[in-house]
Amino acid sequence: MSATTERVTAARSGRNTRKTLARQAIALRSATIAAAVVAWELVARGPMRHNDFLAAPSKVVTDGLSFVLQPDTLLALWQTTFRFLIAFLIVAVAGSALGLVMGRLHRHIFLGARDVVTVLYALPMVPFYPLFVLWAGLGTRSEIAFGVIHGMIPVILMTMSASAQVEPNLISSGETMGASRFQRLLFIIVPSVLPDIVSALKIGAALTLLGVLLAELMISINGVGSFITNQITNHQAAWLNAIVLVVCLGAVVINTGLGWIERRASRWRT
């Protein structure tokens, strides 16, 4: 009984410690955000008060957020969100599938493919956007394609590396029990690397959104990127900062959701 009681006490103590650390982390994050907002307000109303592109948080809330709720702004947000969702869906499905398959290739082929993908990952994609416009046309298709190419490469690279590191004993066990290659991929490899896939998708989501926004900023007639360009031209600092904050908030929501999925998928790991 004493050993059981000690284990229960230790488990409760561990849970309490984790809860305390979580509360401390939340308090630290909240204090950091509050300090940043206060500093932003002081700088915007002090030494940077004549800057046309930096509005104080109070002005962003009073003037900018009401502007965000206007129909034209909501339409621009929806256009960018739609393009991002389509691009990220392609990245999640095609990038994960390609990474899983490429990670299970023969070792020499895998090493060569990994080097090629690594080189592609290192290339700056912005100079290639005019080619996407020529291939897919000006508008939604080229912007989706540019978002896909930004997010696809890191997802493939991280997934193929994780797939190549699956324990060989697990593969051998499945083969011994009569599992086909597809069954081993679906029921052994995918569950083993699922946390790594979700982790790769967190990076892929951020880069996909970046690619869509870059495409809209460079050559676009609508969407958030085009909207930001218009506000820069018109020197509307409060409106500009408000739309940027909304985009940042959306990125935080996406990252938080994928982080929750990653933690759930990693529960079985020590």
Image (cartoon, rainbow, N blue to C red):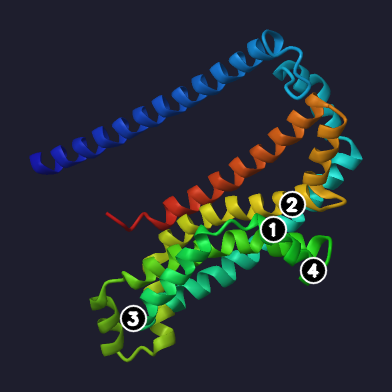
State the mark number for residue 134: 4
Q: Is residue 263 above or below residue 65?
A: below
Q: Is residue 173 visible?
A: yes
Q: Secondary structure at mark 1?
A: helix
On the image, numbered disc 2 is attached to which residue? 81
Residue pictured at 58% horizontal, 72% vertical: 94
Counting from the top left corner in percent of width and height, residue 66 is at 84, 28
Circle 4 residues within 10 Å: few <14, some 14–19, many ≥20: few
Task: First in sequence, mark 1 or 4: give its number.
Answer: 1
State the mark number for residue 108: 3
Is there CB contact under 8 Å for labels 1 and 2?
A: yes
Real-space Cα separation, disc 4 to disc 2, in angstroms:
23 Å
Real-space Cα separation, disc 1 to disc 4, in angstroms:
23 Å
Residue pictured at 53% horizontal, 64% vertical: 153
Q: Secondary structure at mark 4?
A: helix
On the image, numbered disc 1 is attached to which residue? 85
Amino acid, disc 3? His
Real-space Cα separation, disc 1 to disc 2, in angstroms:
6 Å
Q: Nearer the viewer, mark 3 or mark 1?
A: 3
Q: Nearer the viewer, mark 3 or mark 4?
A: 4
Residue pictured at 57% horizontal, 20% vertical: 36
- Looking at the image, residue 256 sits to the left or right of residue 235; the answer is left
Is there CB contact under 8 Å for labels 1 and 4?
A: no
Real-space Cα separation, disc 3 to disc 4, in angstroms:
36 Å
Task: First in sequence, mark 4 or 2: give its number.
Answer: 2
Instruction: Single out the residue that lies furthest toward the front.
Output: 127
Task: First in sequence, mark 3 or 4: give its number.
Answer: 3
